[in-house]
Amino acid sequence: MSLWTHHLSSIDFFDRYTGDDKYIGPAVRLGAGVSTSEAFTAAYSRGFRVVTGTCPDVGVVGGYTAGGGHGVFTSIYGMAADNVLEWEVVTAQGDHIVATPKKHTDLYWALSGGGAGTFAVVVSMVTRVYRDGIIGGARLTFDVEKAGGTEEFWHAVAVFQSALGPVVDAGAVVSYALTPNTLSVYGIAVADGNASIVNQVLMPVTTAMANTGIPLHVTETSHSTFLEFFNQYFLEAVTKTPQAQITGGRLVPRSIMERVSGAETVTQAFRSAVDAGFAIVCDALNANQPRTIRNSVLPVWRSALLHCIIVRTWDFSAPRTEMVGYQTTLTNVVMPQIEKATPGGGAYLNEANFEQPDWQEVFYGTNYPRLKNIKDNVDPLGVFYSRTAVGSESWAEDRDGRLCKI
């Protein structure tokens, strides 16, 4: 079953939402077809911020938020799923219900981070919004030449990554990319901070890097709104990102990265991935923010320092066999090396390898048994299916892509 939700595009704000959660304050109801850019543009027009990602065409509700949802506000407001107040859905039996922390609580819990497209058809959600305001930004880069050599460069990468804990604890999210010769931090977001505060927040990193002999040149800016910040730091990058990609993902535990030996081991695994023809794109963040209601977000998020995707653009001019070979290398070589270097980690189900082995554990962790039980209760016939969604192990695809019950 495939449903087109694009025209479920309503956006309705509440100045003072009161519901089943303890929260009383501003909120917005977003239809299932609302995109990221539509959501944060509407919020901007009302003087608010809403927790979204940065890819403008992604659906905010049924996919992004239902899978957890991270972005530039994660280190201050938590995951998108942490901010959901209610879900409006149609069940497999055709019942139209609203799931909240006090009504249809199992379904509310499952929808808030347990993945999209498998529990019910999401029509809309209500989520908290926050008063917009100043946000600090920054960029920096260093490369092999600045580091003084290849080995020195990769050691510096390890030092940089190991110093990010205090930065994210101060409310920042650091977005960066690794290629064979360069580490490029293309967006640092410090909500409610100006350029001066950004400089203070980054001091653990700049000090650590100076100790390696690499002084960083940081360009800091101040912005009066999130939209202004987004347009400077992310708009060009996300609009030029190719849509066809070979992708894997890993959440890296903070306990590993803050040990020098652990950071070196992880960085060497990243280096191997880069040498195999992939780029590494990471967000450093702290998703362990206060929340009043528990949900089904993968628990590893709460102890992770890095969310990284391992990515290669699909080249349509190359032979298909060559690109399929990269997918095979990702699944059988690259990801196992990174997983070995990051015990206790996991993967963000919205940005991961569709051929991930042991996906139940990697994507859902200890939540999986409860999620599977809820799936069996709300969709006993398996009406809703997605390849790595909860309950999909009950089905198999034949050569023609048809589903057969196991």
Image (spheres, helix red, strand yellow):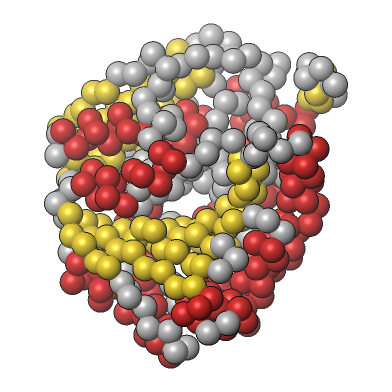
Q: Percent position (x, y) of residue 52? A: 36, 41
Compared with 344, 151 (above or below) is below
User: Residue at (65%, 39%) from the top-left corner?
Assistant: 315
Q: Horizontally, is 272 left or right of 55 in the view?
A: right
User: Residue at (41%, 22%) from the top-left corner?
Assistant: 32
Compared with 62, 143 (above or below) is below
Residue situated in front as seen by the camera: 151 or 265: 151
Q: Is residue 258 visible?
A: no
The quadrant holding residue 284 is bottom left
User: Residue at (25%, 74%) from the top-left corner?
Assistant: 199
Q: Percent position (x, y) of residue 295? A: 48, 43
The quadrant holding residue 246 is top right
The residue at the far front in this view is: 317
Q: Horizontally, is 27 left or right of 208 in the view?
A: left
Q: Percent position (x, y) of residue 396? A: 81, 25
The quadrant holding residue 49 is top left
Q: Percent position (x, y) of residue 257? A: 55, 73
Quadrant housing the N terminus = top right
Q: Is residue 209 visible?
A: yes
Quadrant housing the C terminus = top right
Residue situated in front as seen by the camera: 319 or 394: 319
User: Residue at (35%, 52%) from the top-left corner?
Assistant: 72
